[in-house]
Image: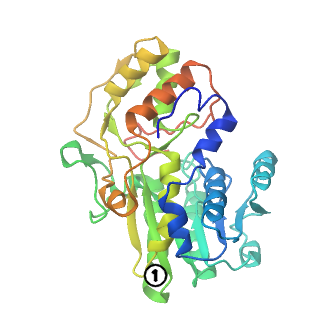
């Protein structure tokens, strides 16, 4: 799939493209019949994941519901989801009475979590990232659960190794990453102790026009902001590819839990990506610092072998995001802080 200016000329067009299900998703959902409940659905990735699920179910000829539970601090997001055919339920997932009131569903996608602002709010970070997964695992013990996690649980990986593997021992740095490993351990415990079928999804990093590492870099280049290259490399994957893997992973949920890295196949250089973005926005990038010998990097080969290669190549994604930012396209205003090396978000 090539992301062209014509195909991405508005937010509606972007959200349509982000919700196109890869071909393997309807096939996977036919293997896991039943409604899909998405917990924490109003974040950056949740809305288009829900819409993708609706479209994939229709493609598969299935009439199951997609149900999206979240606080919906922005009512417009709830209205948008309803317009896409998603059933929404508003409430606080940390409220155990609300959690118990949610409908039983055979398929659950867990997307709730806290990252930015976690420094200074450590107790809430642990509540969202570790306590809540324990509650969800208990409430939906008989469901299949696809649980989003993060490549941050691995810690820094030497560039020469090509990214952390699912079999590598986690070495989380900082309370955010540690609490995310706690999230994984809660779901792993449910799988080991109760037979709950789980897939754990270590994401690193999903990108679209309005959000992600590439959008961050493009915005800095355009605005003449200095770019610290000490975190000199990163992974990027088109958000629709990431969401497609997440939905399809329900068919691979197992006990013990299955673990998948969700990452693009390329180890992208911050310096080289910024130089390309500079060509697109018409302004040379300004760099500070020096590349380190390690970075937060994940190897996505296992997921690629199971689900297929990403449909959007990194170069197409870089060019599309660069054009979007150069043209003044809307942004979500949520920097990734991917350059953080001390684990403090």
Q: Position of residue 203 (x, y in %)?
A: 44, 53
Q: Residue 37, located in which quarter of the rendered image?
A: bottom right
Is residue 206 or residue 180 the one in the foreground? 206
Q: Position of residue 177 (x, y in %)?
A: 43, 56
Is 54 left, or right, of 164 in this rendering? right
Indicate the secondary structure of the residue bearing disc 1.
helix
Residue 169 image offset from top left, x and y in percent: 28, 64
Q: Nearer the viewer, residue 66 or 7?
A: 7
Q: Residue furthest left?
A: 160
Colour theme: rainbow
- Is 81 placed left or right of 23 in the picture? right
Determine the residue positioned at 52% across, 76% down: 31
Q: Residues within 10 Å of mark 1 (few under 14, many from 20)?
A: many
Q: How many numbered circles are shown?
A: 1
Residue in the foreground of this view, choosing between 57 and 185: 57
193 up-or-down from 264: above or below: below
Residue 220 can be seen, yes or no:
yes
Residue that appears at 55% across and 54% down: 21
Q: Is residue 70 above or below residue 215?
A: below
Examine the rendered structure and indicate whether residue 194 appears above or below residue 205: below
Residue at 33% from the left image edge and 54% from the top image edge: 300
- Picture quarter containing residue 38? bottom right
Residue 36 lies in what quarter of the image?
bottom right
**With 9 as the anchor, is 297 left or right in this view?**
left
Q: Is residue 147 visible?
A: no
Q: Residue 72: horizontal and vertical position, in percent?
A: 76, 53
Q: Which residue is mark 1?
A: 191
Residue 27 vs residue 84: left or right?
left
Residue at the spot x=56%, y=37% of the render?
211
């Amino acid at each position: 799939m090539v992301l062209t200016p014509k195909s991405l000329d508005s937010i509606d067009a972007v959200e349509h493209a982000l919700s196109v299900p890869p071909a393997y998703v309807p096939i996977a959902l036919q293997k896991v019949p039943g409604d899909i409940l998405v917990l924490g659905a109003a974040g950056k990735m949740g809305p288009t994941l829900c819409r993708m699920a609706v479209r994939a179910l229709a493609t598969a000829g299935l009439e199951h519901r997609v149900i999206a539970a979240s606080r919906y601090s922005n009512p417009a997001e709830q209205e948008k989801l309803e317009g896409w055919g998603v059933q929404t339920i508003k409430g606080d997932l940390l409220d155990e009475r609300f959690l118990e009131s949610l409908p039983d569903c055979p398929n659950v996608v867990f997307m709730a979590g806290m990252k930015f602002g976690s420094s200074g709010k450590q107790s809430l970070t642990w509540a969202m990232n570790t306590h809540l997964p324990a509650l969800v695992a208990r409430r939906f013990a008989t469901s299949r659960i696809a649980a989003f996690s993060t490549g941050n649980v691995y810690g820094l990986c030497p560039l020469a190794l090509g990214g952390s593997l699912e079999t590598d021992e986690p070495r989380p740095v900082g309370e955010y990453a540690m609490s995310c490993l706690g999230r994984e351990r809660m779901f792993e415990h449910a799988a080991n102790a109760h037979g709950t079928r789980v897939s754990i999804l270590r994401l690193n990093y999903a990108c679209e026009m309005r959000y992600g590492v590439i959008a961050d870099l493009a915005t800095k280049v355009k605005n003449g902001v200095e770019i610290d290259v000490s975190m000199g490399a990163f992974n990027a994957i088109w958000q629709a590819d990431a969401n497609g893997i997440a939905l399809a992973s329900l068919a691979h949920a197992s006990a013990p839990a299955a673990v998948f890295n969700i990452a693009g196949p390329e180890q992208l250089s911050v310096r080289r990506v910024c130089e390309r973005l500079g060509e697109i926005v018409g302004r040379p990038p300004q760099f500070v610092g020096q590349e380190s010998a390690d970075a937060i990097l994940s190897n996505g080969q296992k997921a690629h072998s199971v689900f297929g290669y990403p449909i959007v190549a990194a170069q197409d994604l870089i060019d599309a995001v660069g054009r979007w930012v150069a043209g003044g396209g809307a942004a979500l205003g949520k920097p990734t802080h991917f350059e953080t090396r001390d684990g403090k978000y």
